Image (tube, helix red, strand yellow):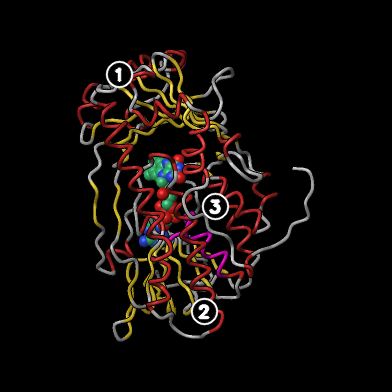
Amino acid sequence: MAAPERTRVAVVGGGPAGMVLGLLLARGGIDTVVLEKHPDFLRDFRGDTVHASTLTLLDELGLGSAFAALPHRLLEEAEIQLDAGTVRLADLGRSLPGLHRHVALVPQWDFLEMLADAAAREPHFTLLRSAEVVGLTHDAGRVAGVRWRDYRPPAAEEPRPADHTLAADLVVGCDGRWSAVRVGADLAPRAFGVPVDVEWFRLPRHAGDPDGGVGRLSGSEFMVMIDRGDSWQCGYLIAKGQDEALRAEGLDAFRARLARLQPWLADRLDRAPDRLEDVKLLDVRIERLDTWHRDGLLLIGDAAHPMSPVGGVGINLAIQDAVAASRIVGQWMRRSPGPVPEDVLAAVQRRRLPPTRLVQAFQRLAHRGVVNRALRGALATSPDTLPLPLKLVGRFPLLQRIPARFIAIGPRPEHAPSWARRLERLGPR
Ligand SMILES: Cc1cc2nc3c(=O)[nH]c(=O)nc-3n(C[C@H](O)[C@H](O)[C@H](O)COP(=O)(O)OP(=O)(O)OC[C@H]3O[C@@H](n4cnc5c(N)ncnc54)[C@H](O)[C@@H]3O)c2cc1C
């Protein structure tokens, strides 16, 4: 495909925020190009959770059946296993309103590919894969487009330069926690101290293993496990900066830690993880921009507010940002040609800042009150000695509605603008 030279909206990054934004704007008749630096969506684990509010959004977009056809698993409760027993933290099945009383677990690449398929049917949508944005262009102080590098294999008959410029009325940075757009716009996020990092790896899943998600806390060790069908995606928490010390202990010592923590895993730990190189360090961060926009530029999702994986809510928050941005910006662009005034972009931030602040505050509290104390061995692991909020939630099932709604729906869920909605013929799912 020849490189486009001009569009109304250039969306940088084809993650959850970028793909949803691209699809919704294109359905509004707004020419939108999404630039994604990877050739596909197959990359390191970045979370598989699709929350109840996103499932409702998919229904609004007429994509409920397409999603239901993807191989997925349902998470209906969240619990934490202690040495003295299991504490249920959230019962989604009983606590949530509406049709979707669960969080779905689906490989992120399948989910993004489904959005890409839906978007490809829109004449106003273009997805450029292997297209890495390397800078912004300016016109009289306004951001006026992007410079991008084309990594697609050249077609023999069409030799093409590797570098291109795409002019746009609006650039939206959806390029994640290490956002190049953010750096290019000279915007620096405020960082909130985080006491933990996470080691991510996979283990085989056997018949008879539990379903869904498992959180396990014992002594000073803490691990979450996410059911991915034939494998477990495991996150082993360590105090920040302890990665080198952990690796110095060697593979056998790491496997022994896992066997101590979850003895039922022992039958596979002689083979997995295969090498310490397969255990990937996630440098956990919580950051937030004070200003999410410049003239001609908006940042949303992790590009505006990198999230901790605690609570598994980053994908949902990024998608909710995209829906709000499409509605606010789309409403203006459908009526008016040319660049989007900065006060319209500021309205997106005004809408999405309060839920972002709230979720990040919850994550910081969880880091301090639970995770950090657990890693210091300061949380005796019996239900009676848990922090008060967890104790209350464990004891009084009605209170489980609060974390259930907070995690599965989130504060201020967003709904698709009318122009993006599609009815689908309902049949058995
Ligand atoms: C290991 C890990 C586990 C996580 N687990 C969960 C979980 O279980 N549930 C959950 O809700 N959240 C989880 N998160 C957080 C979640 O992944 C993010 O909050 C969410 O993906 C943010 O979406 P986004 O679209 O803003 O950014 P991203 O998902 O980061 O997408 C950014 C996209 O931009 C592309 N890109 C980057 N730079 C450029 C460039 N210069 N040019 C073009 N394209 C570019 C990237 O390739 C990527 O596709 C996890 C994060 C990590 C790292």
Check disc 3 and give the amino acid type. Leu
User: Is residue 42 or residue 330 the one in the foreground?
Assistant: 330
Q: Is residue 136 left or right of residue 60?
A: left
User: Within 8 Å: ligand 1 and the Cβ of disc 3?
Assistant: yes
Quick check: is 16 in the magenta stretch? yes
Q: How far apart are marks 2 and 3 (CA)?
A: 25 Å
**Foreground label between 1 and 2:** 1
Q: Nearer the viewer, residue 83 or 385?
A: 385
Closer to viewer: mark 2 or mark 3: 2
Point out the image quarter for the C terminus.
top right
**Image location of residue 384, percent across then percent down:** 36, 18
Q: Is mark 2 on a helix, strand or loop?
A: helix
The residue identified by callout 1 is 380
Per the rendered image, the range of residues in magenta is: 13-25
Residue 132 part of the magenta segment: no
In the structure shown, which secondary structural element does the residue marked by tag 3 occupy? helix
Query: Crowding at label 3, few (<14), some or many (≥20) Cα neighbours within 10 Å?
Result: many
Residue drawn where x is 63% and y is 68% of the image: 418
Q: Which residue is drawn at 52% across and 47% down?
A: 409
